[in-house]
Each structure stands twice: as C-alpha cells, then as structure tokens.
Image (cartoon, helix red, strand yellow):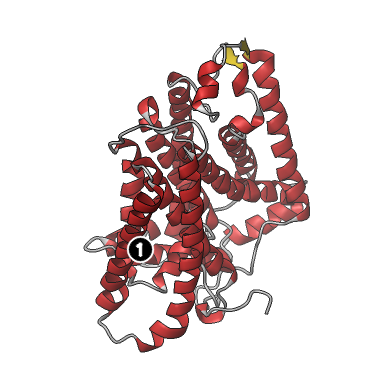
Amino acid sequence: MRPVRVRRSTLPYTHTFGLGGSSLILVGLMIATGVLMMLAYEPTPERAYDSVVGFQDQFLFGGLVRNIHHWSANILVAVVLLHMLRVFLTGGFHGPRRFNWVIGLGLFAGVLAANFTGYLLPWDQLAFWAVTICTGMFSYVPWIGEWLQGMARGGAEIGSATLVIFYAFHTTLVPVTLALLMGFHFWRVRKAGGVVDSRPPDEVADEKPDYVSTLPELLMRELAAALVLIAFVVVLSVFFDAPLGAPANTGMSTNPAKAPWYFVGFQELQLHFHPLVAVVIIPVLVALALLAIPYLRYPKEQSGPWFLTATGRRTAVLAAAAGFVVTAILIVLDELVLQPGAGLPSLVGRGLVPMVLLGAGVFGFRSVLIKRYGASKGEVIQAAFVLFLVALAVLTVTGVWFRGPGMALIWPWG
C-alpha cells in the first residue's frame, strides 16, 4: 500500500485530507461492528425487528455497536464522495490514473449498495417503505423493469425473500466486492506514483527531491488521523442513536415515505419529471458522462492545483451559484405554477420538454464560459460537474428537509 520512501512534500494533511485512508477506516469499522451484529440478527420478517431491539437492549454495548455501524456507513458515503471530488477538482484522473477513476466510481456504487442493502435489515416502518419506494423505481425501466423489480424483491412484494436477498448481499457479496476493488484501487494509486501534487506546477518543478522514510514519518500521521476519525465516530455514536421506528406494517405507509437520503435527490426528480426521465434517462446519462470524463480528448491535460487554474476557480464558483439558484427557483416554480396547469401529455410535458430546455440552458452556459471567460475544455467539464453536483445537493436537501406529508413543500421548522 505504501512505498518505502515518500516525498516530504506529500506529508501535510491538506495534500489529500486523508479521505482515501478515512474510507478504509470506516469500512473497517463497518465490518467489525457488522460481524458483531450478525451474531444476534435473524433475517426473517418475524424476528428481524425484535433481534435488532434485543441486540441494542440486552447485549453489552449493543446499542453503541449499532450506532457506530450506522454512522460509519453514512459518513462513508460523504467521505467517498468528497474523495472523488478532490480527485476531480485537482485533475487527478489523467494519464495512468484514468482507469483508477473508473474503479473509484465502482467503489462509490459499492458503498451505496452496502448502505442500501443494509437499510432494510432493521425491518421497521422507515426501512420497509423506503426500500419499497426504491425498488418500485425499477418498474419504470423499459421492457425489463418488472423483471428487475422481481429480482430485487425476490417476488412481487417485499417479504421474507427480499430480506434474505438483502442480507446475503449486505453481509457477503458487497463486502467482498468492496475489499477486492479497494485493494485494486490502492495498488493502482501506487503504480501511478501516488496521488497528484496539488501545488502549482512551477513550485513542484523547482523543488529538489526530498524523500523521507514511510515509517515513521507517514505511518504515524496516518495512524493519528485514523484515531481521530474513530474517536469522532464513537463520540457521535454515544450521543446520537441510529434511527429505529415502529415495526414494519405492510398495510400502512408512512407519510411522507422517503427513500434513503443518498437517493432522495432522484426521488425529488420524480416530482418534476416523468418517471422514465427521472429514474432511467438522467441517471444513465450521468453515469455515462462520469465514466467518459477521463477518456475525453483534452488539448492539455491539466492536473495538480485545485480547480486547475484561476479561470477554473472562477467558472466553478459561477457554476455552483448557478446550480444553487436555478435549481431552487425551478423547484418552487414547478411546485407553485407549472404542476397545477400541466396540459401536455405526461412524457412530453414532464419529460422531453424539460430535458430540451435544460439541455439548451446548459449549452448556453457552456457558451458563456468559453466566450466570456475563455475557459478550456477541462475547465468547462469541471464547471458542468460542479453545476450537476450542486443541483443534486439542492434536490437532496429539498427532499430531506423541505418535503412534508404528501411530499408537499414545507418549512422544516414550521
């Protein structure tokens, strides 16, 4: 995982913010606590909820162990996302690191799969109806939607077969896949010569090579960062319990019924787009764009400094502001004005027309970046990435905190 010697310039914490190593520590916490929980958990609808309650109440530190497992899993989603964002914003996906970006996307998908498959296991109201919503999205996939939904649920409805499938994936298939991908990912990082130096290229070029021993210089820093992270998760778990609602009631849905927070953004999209567009077309286009990013032809493969250049920083800030303001305005406008008077056919009025308008808006924004700021191809792609990420964040925050009964817009403090 580490060479015998490393450059002294790579030792400061701000070089990578320890995000890759933090992900490894959080996965370790999840596995350790998950194994302990497996000793008491029973994956049947009749016993799942009671076994979780029994583990919390009857086992020494059982509640703390479950809290650590829960918070480690949720923090891991954010840490992996931040790690990918750091790699992207420093151009660390060029050259020999191209395929490692793809592996990183696979790891992120694996982390989401780990969280989602574990979400159902407590078998409470929150989990049951959240998974019902998410698996229901499969039905919108053309031609194979019903088959995909049946495969995910193990039948027409969520029941004992669904719980066994999710338990098997969560405790075996997903962890093994994550372990293999992480090992491959770390090996590729070292093969590429480590992470990209985030300092200005001139400063890196003028520096005389100064190597230090990995042990203890780097290892002690990583150990200290790991202990701080573990302490943070433990303290958080002491004061904040993992949610556990009433036992699952298959005949009475919660209101509102929401997907897990990391999928709420796509649930929010369903309120503004035709389901085919929100669940299939947009996610597929985003996934293909993310996979293609390192393999596009760039006139100059810029990497190293944050946001690439001064122009890159300006265009990224502009994209973030545009993503925040425009997304928030469109949500409110659609809620208050457009939905009551929808007169066009569903797929046209809620799908094709908005997609064409948004595409025209993004193309116009691209033209502004090139003509007004002289942005390069890499800077334009960076701005588009930031625009999408901020828009998704606004959709997620709206879905989590600003949607009440009937998924109507509310003030969270009202």
What residue is at 73 percent from the left and 36 percent from the top?
228
User: Depth check: 58 or 128 in front?
Assistant: 128
User: Depth check: 260 or 347 in front?
Assistant: 347
Please name the amino acid that badge 1 sits on. Val
User: Depth check: 388 or 154 in front?
Assistant: 388
Quarter containing the C terminus: bottom right
Across and down, in percent, residue 385 comes to 42, 50
What residue is at 56 percent from the left and 80 percent from the top?
405
Across and down, in percent, residue 75 comes to 61, 47
Across and down, in percent, residue 146 comes to 28, 64
Query: Does residue 128 show up?
Result: yes
When the figure is inspected, residue 58 is found, relative to residue 243, above or below; the finding is above
Q: Quadrant of residue 34?
A: top right
Across and down, in percent, residue 347 comes to 26, 75
When the figure is inspected, residue 284 is found, relative to residue 294, above or below; the finding is below
Q: Which residue is mark 1?
A: 279
